[in-house]
Amino acid sequence: MFFEITHKEKHTRARTGILRTEHGEIETPVFMPVGTQATVKSLDSADLHNLRTQIILANTYHLHLRPGEDIIADFGGLHNFMQWDGPILTDSGGFQVFSLAQTKKGVTEDETNGAEHAKLVSIDEEGVTFRSHIDGSTRRFTPESAIEIQHKLGADIIMAFDECTPDNANDAYTIEAMERTHRWAGQSLAAHKKNPTHHGYKQFLFGIIQGANHEDLRKQSAEYISGLDFDGIAIGGESIGYNMEATKQILDWVYPILPEQKPHYTMGLGHSPRDLFEVVERGIDMFDCVSPTRMARNGTLFVHPSIEASGRIMITNSKYKTDHHPIDATFDGSPIQNYSRAYLHHLFKTQELLAYRIATLHNLYFLSKLMSDMREAIKNDTFLELKKQWVT
Amino acid sequence: MFFEITHKEKHTRARTGILRTEHGEIETPVFMPVGTQATVKSLDSADLHNLRTQIILANTYHLHLRPGEDIIADFGGLHNFMQWDGPILTDSGGFQVFSLAQTKKGVTEDETNGAEHAKLVSIDEEGVTFRSHIDGSTRRFTPESAIEIQHKLGADIIMAFDECTPDNANDAYTIEAMERTHRWAGQSLAAHKKNPTHHGYKQFLFGIIQGANHEDLRKQSAEYISGLDFDGIAIGGESIGYNMEATKQILDWVYPILPEQKPHYTMGLGHSPRDLFEVVERGIDMFDCVSPTRMARNGTLFVHPSIEASGRIMITNSKYKTDHHPIDATFDGSPIQNYSRAYLHHLFKTQELLAYRIATLHNLYFLSKLMSDMREAIKNDTFLELKKQWVT
């Protein structure tokens, strides 16, 4: 069985479970660090193991452009290419394609290249034509090609090709985009079912619910995607993770419709440890976000709210220049617990490469430990007590 | 005993030895990686241990400016500050002060900031007044203050304050600078002898031979420095390591004068594995150089000459895009041996932070292993056979 629920918390919709893949078991709920270009920025695979990372995410759009899926397939897939033997999830590439289109409006999700480029994204019923942000070459993704690329990349969990509609699109366009996403979901599934095994193991395919912030569309999309034979259900959209009020609302709308026995995944969620409590409480099993690693590289570090009410400190602040304490003394067991705030402050001020690595190790260990605590609380039916310490 | 010679090779002046410090024993000959700002760029202390690093070098000039020696002294010295429990050597700051002056001529040794700044270095008999390249503030080093700063930093081995004369200085100035270096050597020694113990352990002080590329001055300087009660003897100067013909010549001039029982150190030497053979053959026990780590960050990686006659490959070359081999298959035991050239090529092409770390780990492991092989060959009196494989 791919997904098994091991405990349902008494007072909330929170649950613990196990995802079983060729590259190991994943205890849920789980935060998945993002390794956009086949590396979690600044870390190697030994680091990921030290952090007790259970699964990482990689981006199909970026890997298609560099180094290209054929080079990775020639290695027998991403695991061998990047020497990470744990589970991997790839997105379908759609989100990045559409967020590149959005850079026209000053929004970008491409953390590797924030520069504005002349973009050209054109959507038709069969797929999306776009330009590479690397060399301007014209490319095209269809549901079938997005699945084929993901087959070559060989992640344990792959995603259906979808259109992430902007929240500010008009009603007519939002409906049109949702219906296109539904058709593409069916096509993605058909393309995958023909041959779900690559590089010697089965890959699992998730469908994605869209519908922006419309209650009727979200419910309709949840019905449609839940009715298809996917291995898991994701909730996508611009608001998810970025607007927590909208996210909570959307989760409350779709929850009664989601098949209980399938894993539930909110895409792009995890800007703050608090957000994780909100969605776990609402029955979510998986989430990923670039923020914890991106914030780390800016010197923003997670700490327990008992240390700083905001749950984060900015290590470049001059008050840390002489601070002998570890970043967060409440988090023992961290691989970087011996380093002082003063040392990390110094590394950031001198722009030393080690700064980014220590900070990244900290934020990811912090989330790894927090999720472990959360799973323990769910098993003890004390989830709300733990949440109270974090969300006030 | 601080330094013990354990074997003298039969056919050359090469020898093996042991340096004993508070933070551990060092087998010589040894290459010392440079950790300018209290970090070997991109590596943490666990990495250094994995590379079997015996001792690292840190730069007094940089640490004086950021974070300042008082903050480090407050931690009980560099070892605690950077969480590296092995031996450390600090330079006296002089070399960086003078090389900043040289940036006017387009030469810089400051690997952390290559930008041209308005520099002001003024040398008098008592010391050097200069401007910080960080904030332009006026600073002054004297032999006494350079020793005091190094006492606060707490390295196991510290260096006398000297003036590194440019090779193209006229004869009169070269003599004047050498004589000043000799006076400063005496003052450094006196300042240190008053109190050689800090942070609870004894620090060892080395003197530095100057004299540019003049045979008479080099011999005179070797006589003078060898006559003082230093724990070790360094050979400094612009040519050392940068002009190997001049370096070999200088070593041949001074060798008969150097006290055999003291460790011999060529400063700034190690641009290429070949260079290490040349100086070990001439009785040198220690050397440091920023090049192996700096080259790594540019994608230049050491390989055995049987792989590439030049002894290095440029991993960004497109021929490595699909190359499944490890960087150097002859170097097993490396902590990064599982990563392929294609993966590292991808990381460099996408400017991923992990690229710099893997490349740095490679070049330093390469030198660590090479020095271990060299010590073995010296003990077996087969140094020249080993050298023949590397220097053709």
Image (cartoon, coloured by chain):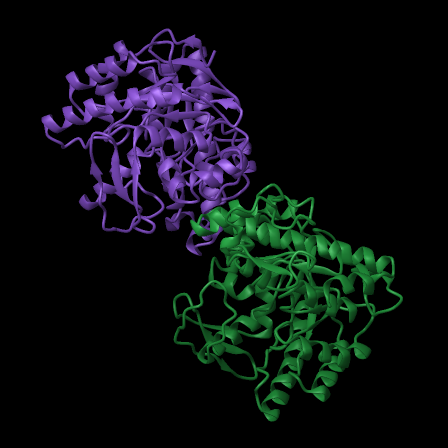
Chain colours: A green, B purple
**Picture quarter containing residue B220?**
top left
Image quadrant containing the N terminus of chain A: bottom right
Residue at the far top: name it: B10
Residue B218: horizontal and vertical position, in percent?
A: 20, 19
Horizontal side of residue A290 vs B125, given as left or right:
right
- Measured along the vertical axis of the image, is residue B312 above or below residue B380? below
Residue A147: horizontal and vertical position, in percent?
A: 61, 68
Residue A326: horizontal and vertical position, in percent?
A: 61, 46
- Measured along the vertical axis of the image, is residue B182 above or below residue A316? above
Report the number of numbered marks.
Answer: 0
The answer to whether residue B306 of the structure is visible from this angle is: no
The answer to whether residue B223 of the structure is visible from this angle is: yes
Residue at the far right: name it: A10
Residue A7: horizontal and vertical position, in percent?
A: 86, 60
**Picture quarter containing residue A88?**
bottom right
- Measured along the vertical axis of the image, is residue B42 above or below residue A10? above
Horizontal side of residue B308 vs A36, given as left or right:
left
Residue at the far bottom: name it: A172
Judging depth in this view, the residue of A236 and B7 nearest the camera is: B7
Judging depth in this view, the residue of B227 and A57 nearest the camera is: B227
**Picture quarter containing residue B29?**
top left
Q: Residue at x 52, y 74 (%)?
A: A99
Judging depth in this view, the residue of B40 and B316 nearest the camera is: B40
Horizontal side of residue B98 vs A392, given as left or right:
left
Q: Residue at x 70, y 49 (%)?
A: A330
Image quadrant containing the C terminus of chain A: bottom right
